[in-house]
Image (cartoon, rainbow, N blue to C red):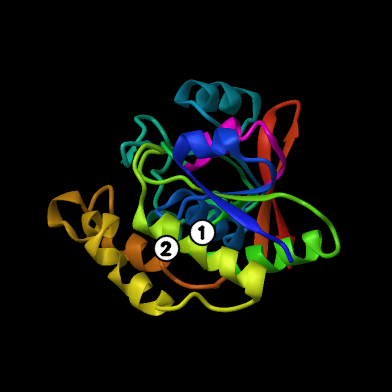
Amino acid sequence: MTNCKILHLLSGAKEARGLTVIIDVFRAFSLECYLYDLGAGLVRPVGSVEEARELQKKIPGSVLIGERQGIKVEGFDFGNSPAQVESEKEKIEGKVIIHTTSAGTQGIVNAVGATEILTGSLVNARAVAEYIRKETSGKALEVSLVAMGLSAKKEAAEDELCAEYIKLLVEENKILPAFEERRQDLKNHDGKRFFDPALQEHFPEKDYYMCIKQDLFPFVLRIGKDDLGFFSERIDV
């Protein structure tokens, strides 16, 4: 049986070994799933705003998406919002997306001990679990599930829930007890910001509902690396 170790925050990403899943539900890796569903050509996660801008110079026509403290980076095309990109298919389809965030993409660049990296969110959690089950079948492989939390500094209920959900699916092929109740209760934790009228420009309420959807996409996003840096590739499960 495959055993999954749940780790937390930036330190957890640095500790991760083996097949590693970097989890960011609100909103980085939910957004990347939606981007691929909109027909994005390639998504390139990067660590810093400066790297993102430099990379755009090397990839004409690429689209800059990113946030710091949840706020769209000045000069970028979009913030880290699935609701804001879903009606902009013509600006996403076929394009290279350069993506930088406070938590999720930081996990990728810091998971230096991983042998393979996937991204994780509730919208493709079952696909992630199925991929892990297939990859680890009959093998003694370490599996690390890293819940990145709020700005990679504070544990977040949505990422912890996603990690626990994937872990039980992988280990016992069972749904986490009280999963639905906990999923619906996320609005009382870090999900609160999506219901603040003063924050709708940066945290639209629709983002909350798009990010807590369960098992919407039948694919995983696996991280690769080339001369330009990291990229995610869609793999149907």
- Tell which of 33 and 60 is nearer to you: 33
Looking at the rendered structure, the secondary structure element under dot 2 is helix
Residue holding disc 2:
211
In the image, what residue occupies the spot 41% across and 36% down?
A: 102
Task: Examine the structure image and report whether residue 115 is included in the region drawn in magenta.
Answer: yes
**Quadrant in the picture for residue 215:** bottom right
Q: Please say if 176 is above or below 64.
A: below
Amino acid carrying mark 1 in the image: Ala
- The C terminus sits in image quarter: bottom right
Residue 77 on image: x %, y % = 43, 39
Looking at the rendered structure, the secondary structure element under dot 1 is helix
Q: Earlier in the sequence, mark 1 or mark 2?
A: 1
Taking the image as shown, residue 212 lies to the left or right of residue 57, namely: left
Task: Examine the structure image and report whether residue 125 is included in the region drawn in magenta.
Answer: no
Residue 95 on image: x %, y % = 62, 45
Q: Residues within 10 Å of mark 2 (few under 14, many from 20)?
A: many
- The N terminus sits in image quarter: bottom right
Residue holding disc 1:
163
Q: Please say if 175 is above or below 141.
A: below
Give the alpha-carbon distance from disc 1 to disc 2, as whole Å.
Answer: 15 Å
Stretch in magenta? 104-117
In the image, what residue occupies the spot 63% across and 31% down?
A: 60
Residue 31 on image: x %, y % = 49, 54
In the image, what residue occupies the spot 52% across and 67% down?
A: 165
- Tell which of 48 and 128 is nearer to you: 128
In the image, what residue occupies the spot 31% across and 37% down?
A: 69
**Quadrant in the picture for residue 54:** top right
